[in-house]
């Protein structure tokens, strides 16, 4: 049993309208033009009905990650394995499943308390995707790669060994790269474990060994060309969103990207040229550098 992809994120926001403007006017995502009684708004990248749900919340934080299994049998196998290992699963009700556009789902917390929604059977939306900023296509998979999910997310995992075991033994992810970035003297050791799903994207989910109050270290959106990345950078600066890492290229997934803070402070990586991997022939790596070049960090405050 393998996890197919990381399908969506649910993001809690203290200012949903500001997040939607950022999502459409900077990231170039399409407003799905659906809202529900709770005031949740939805952003599309492709034929999935949404990849990001922006939900009114007292805090700006990641509410949950939607993890997609290819079919009911794979999903059931993961649920059985989690129950057998002593994890508490909450069955999703039909109304919520309809809202998430999935056939069925369960909710479970990982060892760090990150909330996961495991699902299968997504209802697609065939209305043409029109990016308000002219992004030609978001990289989420095609007829050659299959669905590669929305991108990737890095989430906190202070007890990183427990989280690695949870995701590799029970959820169905594999390890791609284990990064020990250089740290200033006296700083605690930093470690990021990058994990892949059963699709060619070099990593779909990564674990960071330090607590992160917002529940997400960053999330990544991939576009098709360098010009689209550059245009996104111009739009982010023009709209006054803090750019917290300059243009650069990562060593492990080859992503050429910059990082910007969304309204409320969640970091978004915006890049192109991510590595596609054949897992049959890949050997996991250990990295001691995060970047080939660039990504000069500049955190406000
Ligand atoms: Fe990233």
Image (tube, rainbow, N blue to C red):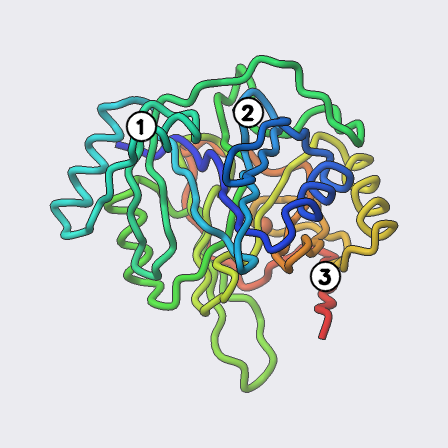
For label 1, the residue is 94
Residue 211, image x, y percentages? 45, 69
The residue lying furthest to the left in this view is 84
Quadrant assignment for the C terminus? bottom right
Dividing the picture into quadrants, the one containing residue 225 is top right
Residue 120, image x, y percentages? 34, 26
Number of other residues with Cα within 10 Å of mark 1, as a class: few under 14, some 14 to 19, many 20 or more: few
Q: Foreground: 113 or 232?
A: 113
Spatial distance from mark 3 to mark 2, Cα to Cα? 28 Å
Q: Nearer the viewer, mark 3 or mark 1?
A: 1
- Mark 3 element type: strand
For label 2, the residue is 141
Q: Is residue 60 left or right of residue 63?
A: right
Of callouts 3 and 1, the N-terminal one: 1
Identify the residue shown where x is 54% and y is 30%: 50
Q: Which mark is residue 244?
A: 3
Dividing the picture into quadrants, the one containing residue 2 is top left
Q: Nearer the viewer, mark 3 or mark 2?
A: 3
Q: Which mark is residue 157?
A: none
Residue 46, image x, y percentages? 60, 24
Q: Foreground: 145 or 288?
A: 145
Identify the residue shown where x is 27% and y is 54%: 165
Spatial distance from mark 2 to mark 1, Cα to Cα? 28 Å
Q: Nearer the viewer, mark 2 or mark 1?
A: 1
């Amino acid at each position: 049993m393998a996890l197919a992809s990381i399908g969506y994120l649910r993001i809690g926001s203290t200012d949903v309208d500001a997040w939607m403007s950022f999502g459409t006017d900077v990231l170039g995502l399409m407003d799905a033009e659906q809202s529900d009684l709770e005031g949740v708004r939805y952003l599309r990248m492709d034929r999935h009905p949404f990849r990001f749900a922006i939900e009114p919340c007292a805090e700006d934080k990641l509410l949950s990650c939607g993890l997609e299994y290819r079919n009911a049998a794979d999903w059931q196998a993961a649920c059985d394995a989690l129950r057998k290992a002593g994890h508490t699963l909450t069955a999703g009700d039909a109304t919520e499943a309809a809202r998430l556009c999935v056939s069925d789902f369960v909710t479970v917390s990982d060892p760090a308390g990150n909330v996961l929604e495991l699902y299968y059977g997504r209802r697609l939306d065939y209305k043409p995707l029109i990016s308000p900023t002219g992004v030609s296509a978001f990289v989420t998979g095609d007829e050659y790669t299959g669905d590669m999910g929305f991108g990737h997310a890095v989430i906190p995992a202070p007890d990183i060994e427990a989280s690695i075991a949870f995701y590799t033994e029970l959820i169905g992810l594999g390890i791609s790269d284990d990064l020990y970035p250089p740290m200033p003297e006296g700083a605690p050791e930093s470690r990021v474990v990058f994990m892949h799903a059963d699709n060619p994207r070099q990593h779909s989910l990564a674990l960071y060994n330090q607590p992160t109050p917002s529940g997400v270290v960053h999330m990544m959106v991939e576009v098709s060309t360098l010009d689209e990345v550059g245009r996104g950078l111009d739009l982010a600066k023009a709209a006054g969103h803090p750019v917290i890492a300059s243009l650069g290229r990562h060593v492990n997934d080859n992503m050429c990207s910059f990082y910007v803070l969304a309204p409320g402070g969640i970091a978004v990586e915006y890049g192109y040229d991510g590595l596609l991997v054949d897992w049959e022939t890949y050997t996991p790596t250990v990295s001691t550098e995060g970047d080939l070049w660039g990504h000069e960090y500049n955190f406000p405050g």
